[in-house]
Image: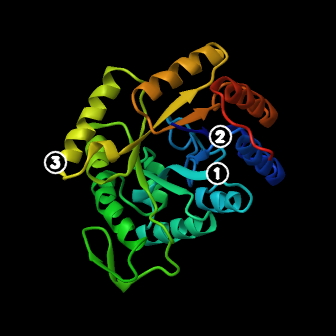
């Protein structure tokens, strides 16, 4: 089970570039294998959109994932993960071009996670319909695969049209496409189309049900369910501490998770240094191999 971190950008996203670099190189040195970043292009003003119930607003800090990961590719060997790009609010061909560039810069170390998102305000600002996002995503994923692997693509779909065009340079190795989501529709989509999925669940009956839906959809699509990766999420908290995190990590491993992402977001840690202190403690408890970085 490969273990990485969730970049806590809502808390340290506005840090100086030298501190962002220090965060990435430190977690790599601690033995973590990947770094996962969230995606939001715009935040909503809660006063304009009252009553606002979303987890993020106009003051929540988000780095642009592709630019940020391209920067990290220059000085780390971490696997770089988008968890997730809100794909239906973005142009498919442009996402393919950006992903191809990051994959090239990172020498194949990009895992492209995509999903639907929840913020209708953002969809409106980016010129896409919120109520069509599920159908759009189902069309986009196969098209992304073609754009990331074929020299010339022609596609005439409900949402995208491409006539004899392609990306150059193409990635040298396939870019794995993973799906995030928490609904039966998202699970079926993952089973049909994804190389892996990000469960927004904890181990238990609801996760078992989701895995069964994914497996059934995979079989119906002629795919092997065992080939679909799973990236579990464990969060550090002052209440549970290391013992609770280790218990959850062990449960993910027993379930056969291929990846595990450790999150220190929303734990009240504050400074970048405090996030790194906790990650160092977690790395030691998990027995990760440190490097000389």
Horizontal relation, residue 30 to residue 129: left or right: right
The residue where tag 3 is placed is 220
Q: Residue at x 37, y 66 (%)?
A: 145
Q: Quadrant of residue 261?
A: top right
> Residue 212: which quarter of the image?
top left
In the picture of the structure, the residue carrying the numbered disc 2 is 32
> Counting other residues with Cα less than 10 Å from the Cα at mark 1, is it few (<14), some (14-19), or many (20 or more)?
many
Q: Earlier in the sequence, mark 2 or mark 3?
A: 2
Q: Residue at x 46, y 22 (%)?
A: 251
Q: Are marks 2 and 1 in contact (CB under 8 Å)?
A: yes
Distance (Cα) linking label 3 and label 1: 35 Å
Q: Crowding at label 3, few (<14), some or many (≥20) Cα neighbours within 10 Å?
A: few
Q: CA distance from mark 2 to mark 3?
A: 36 Å
Q: Percent x, y for residue 278?
A: 73, 27
**What secondary structure is marked by label 2?**
loop
Find the residue positioned furthest to the left.
Answer: 220
Q: Secondary structure at mark 3?
A: helix
Quick one: label 3 or label 1, which is nearer the N terminus?
1
Q: Nearer the viewer, residue 220 or 10?
A: 220
Residue 224 location in percent, x, y? 26, 47
Image position, residue 44 (x, y; %): 55, 46
User: Can residue 151 be seen in the rendering of this structure?
Assistant: yes
**Residue 78: image tag:** 1
Q: Earlier in the sequence, mark 2 or mark 1?
A: 2
């Amino acid at each position: 089970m490969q273990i990485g971190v969730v970049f806590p950008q809502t808390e340290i996203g506005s840090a100086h570039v030298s501190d962002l670099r220090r965060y990435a190189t430190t977690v790599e040195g601690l033995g973590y294998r990947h770094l996962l970043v969230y995606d939001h292009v715009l935040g909503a003003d809660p006063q304009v959109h009252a009553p606002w119930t979303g987890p993020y607003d106009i003051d929540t800090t988000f780095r642009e994932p592709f630019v940020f990961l391209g920067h990290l590719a220059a000085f780390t060997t971490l696997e770089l993960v988008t968890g997730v790009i809100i794909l239906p609010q973005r142009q498919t061909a442009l996402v393919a071009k950006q992903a191809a560039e990051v994959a090239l810069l990172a020498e194949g170390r990009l895992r492209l996670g995509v999903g639907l998102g929840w913020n209708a305000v953002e969809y409106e600002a980016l010129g896409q319909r919120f109520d069509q996002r599920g159908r759009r995503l189902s069309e986009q994923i196969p098209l992304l695969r073609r754009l990331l692997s074929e020299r010339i693509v022609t596609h005439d779909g409900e949402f995208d049209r491409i006539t004899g065009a392609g990306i150059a340079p193409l990635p040298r190795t396939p870019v794995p496409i993973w799906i995030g989501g928490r609904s039966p529709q998202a699970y079926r989509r993952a089973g049909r189309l994804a190389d892996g999925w990000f469960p927004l669940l904890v181990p238990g009956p609801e996760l078992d049900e989701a895995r069964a839906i994914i497996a059934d959809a995979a079989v119906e699509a002629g795919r092997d369910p065992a080939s679909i990766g799973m990236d579990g999420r464990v969060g550090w908290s002052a209440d549970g501490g290391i013992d609770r995190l280790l218990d959850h990590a062990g449960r993910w491993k027993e379930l056969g998770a291929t990846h595990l992402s450790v999150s220190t977001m929303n734990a009240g840690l504050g400074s970048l240094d405090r996030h790194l202190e906790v990650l160092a403690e977690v790395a030691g408890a998990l027995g990760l191999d440190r490097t000389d970085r």
